[in-house]
Image: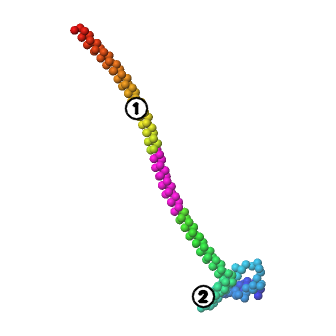
Amino acid sequence: MGLFDVFKDKDEDENSGGMAEETPSFESEPEPAETPSSQPEPEETPSTEATEETTSYSQPAEETTSYSQAGTAVQSQLGIEGLMDKRFKLGEAIDYVGSMIKELRDKRTGLVKSIEEESVDIKNLKEKLTKINQFIQEENEGLQELTRKRSEVEKDADDVGGIVYSLRDKITEIDKIVADEASRIKSFKGSKN
């Protein structure tokens, strides 16, 4: 059989007008030696599946066994099982990476929350320290004002003390004058007698 005999069988089935399914057999397929190297392997799969379907319709009692045996043979021949294993392992790896990413996001979210809480606490402390600093500045200004006022009061007290000493001296002089005048008056009265 040649490479195009598969298509001739199909044409003959269509021309016969029957309801028969397409039944290309393994014999109608080109042998691996006749297959050109440019023809990709996946094209073999549809004809094999068609054969499997025909087999399953013509022999319903052996449907599961023949289908699974042929499917397994084709899958192992094409390396589909290996691909499926790789796909499964890749799926598991992707799931694992996804869970790691979720854990990292959760940790990052936790860190962000912690940092925000610490930031709020630090801002509160900073506000308190600013208020304490303002209070200390106000107290220092108040103490400086008190020192200035005390200096003024001391100066006023010194002035008052100076005035008092000066008035005392004046009163002492007046007292001397009064005493002198009293003694003169006494002596004057005594001389009249």
Question: In the image, is 160 to the left or to the right of 111?
Answer: left
Q: Quadrant of the C terminus?
A: top left
Image point (70%, 82%), residue name? 44
Image point (76%, 78%), residue name? 38
**Residue 97 belongs to magenta span:** no
Quick check: can you spot residue 44? yes
Question: In the image, is 58 to the left or to the right of 127?
Answer: right
- Rendered position, 65 above or below 181: below
Q: Position of residue 85 (x, y in %)?
A: 63, 79
Q: Quadrant of residue 34?
A: bottom right
Residue type beneath disc 2: Thr
**Residue 123 belongs to magenta span:** yes
Q: Position of residue 62 (x, y in %)?
A: 61, 91
Q: Magenta stretch mostly in which secondary structure?
A: helix
Image point (31%, 19%), residue name? 175
User: Mark 2 or mark 1: which is in front?
Assistant: 1
Question: In the image, is 7 to the left or to the right of 109?
Answer: right
Residue type beneath disc 1: Val
Q: Position of residue 53 (x, y in %)?
A: 64, 85
Question: In the image, is 58 to the left or to the right of 114?
Answer: right
In this orientation, which residue lies closer to the viewer: 101 or 152?
A: 152
Question: Which element is circle 2 on?
Answer: helix
Query: Of all residues shown, which one is farthest toward the top?
Result: 192
What is the CA distance from the residue labelled 2 to the residue labelled 1?
A: 117 Å
Query: Of all residues shown, which one is farthest toward the left?
Result: 193
Q: Which residue is mark 1?
A: 153
Q: Between disc 2 and disc 1, whose residue precedes?
A: 2
Q: Position of residue 17 (x, y in %)?
A: 68, 86
User: What label does residue 64 carry, if any?
Assistant: 2
In magenta, the rendered stretch is: 110-134
Question: Which element is circle 1 on?
Answer: helix
